[in-house]
Image: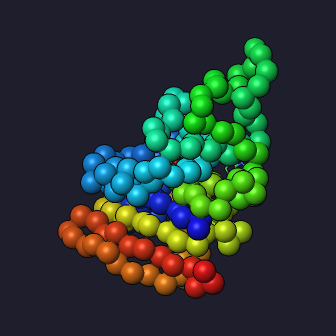
Amino acid sequence: MIGLIAVVDADFGVSKNRSIPWSFPEDRRLFYAKTKNSVLVMGKNTFLETEEIPLKGRINCVVSRELSLKGHNDESIVKFQPNVRIFQTIEDVCAEYDDFWLIGGAKLYNYALNKNLVDYALITRLHRRHNADTFLDYFHFEKFSKKILEENSHYSISEYFCNNF
Ligand SMILES: NC(=O)c1ccc[n+]([C@@H]2O[C@H](COP(=O)([O-])OP(=O)(O)OC[C@H]3O[C@@H](n4cnc5c(N)ncnc54)[C@H](OP(=O)(O)O)[C@@H]3O)[C@@H](O)[C@H]2O)c1
């Protein structure tokens, strides 16, 4: 199963100025619980934003056409860490793993949605707007069945199931 996990604002914004413009501990807890012992797949920008610190207890797959783990004197090289893997495409990840979470950012999410690769999504939506500059292409979820798991005055958490899955 290919899952997508994201937090979005009221406009389905994902980030602003290359960082997440909100602090939301409840969601970090949900993220850590759901992705424990899993394979995570992220775009280059998301990985570089973590200063190349991989999430513990998970295989961290970074998708990039530019980064590599080999070579010398080159800024495109990621330092070797046993739980970090670099793939050129999401399709290359699919060739090795059946089950993984897409954890962002927007470019990676939207590519996977556009290619109908996503089976399931877990989306926390904040009710506030945060003037984001990158967005989840929400229209893709019209093809999904939605189930609200939790709703309060600040956010809602919903599951989306691909109707073809
Ligand atoms: N709200 C949330 O839940 C959430 C979650 C995660 C991240 N974020 C935020 O999102 C922001 C980053 O998002 P972003 O859209 O700028 O970048 P991103 O998706 O993290 O990374 C984009 C880069 O990853 C590579 N990439 C992505 N999709 C690819 C594909 N299908 N095939 C090959 N390479 C692919 C490309 O690298 P190359 O140019 O090297 O090919 C691309 O330039 C960060 O600020 C982060 O904090 C938010």
Total labels drawn = 0
Q: Out of 17 and 71, give the one closest to the viewer.
A: 71
Tell me if 42 is positioned left or right of 27 in this view. right
Does residue 130 appear anywhere in the picture? no
Tell me if 111 is positioned left or right of 22 in this view. right
Residue appearing at x 26%, y 73% in the figure: 151
Q: Quadrant location of residue 27?
A: bottom left
Residue 65 position, x and y percent, is 77, 42
Q: Quadrant of the N terminus?
A: bottom right
Q: Colour mode?
A: rainbow
Residue appearing at x 54%, y 30% in the figure: 52
Tell me if 138 is positioned left or right of 87 in this view. left
Q: Out of 52 and 135, give the one closest to the viewer.
A: 52
Q: Out of 163 and 7, give the one closest to the viewer.
A: 163
- The extreme left residue here reads 153
Q: Is 151 above or below relative to 55? A: below
Q: Is 18 above or below relative to 13? A: above
Q: Is 148 above or below relative to 44? A: below
Does residue 1 appear anywhere in the picture? yes
Q: Out of 145 and 130, give the one closest to the viewer.
A: 145
Residue 32 position, x and y percent, is 38, 50
Q: Quadrant of the C terminus?
A: bottom right
Residue appearing at x 75%, y 57% in the figure: 95
Residue 25 position, x and y percent, is 27, 48
Residue appearing at x 66%, y 68% in the figure: 117
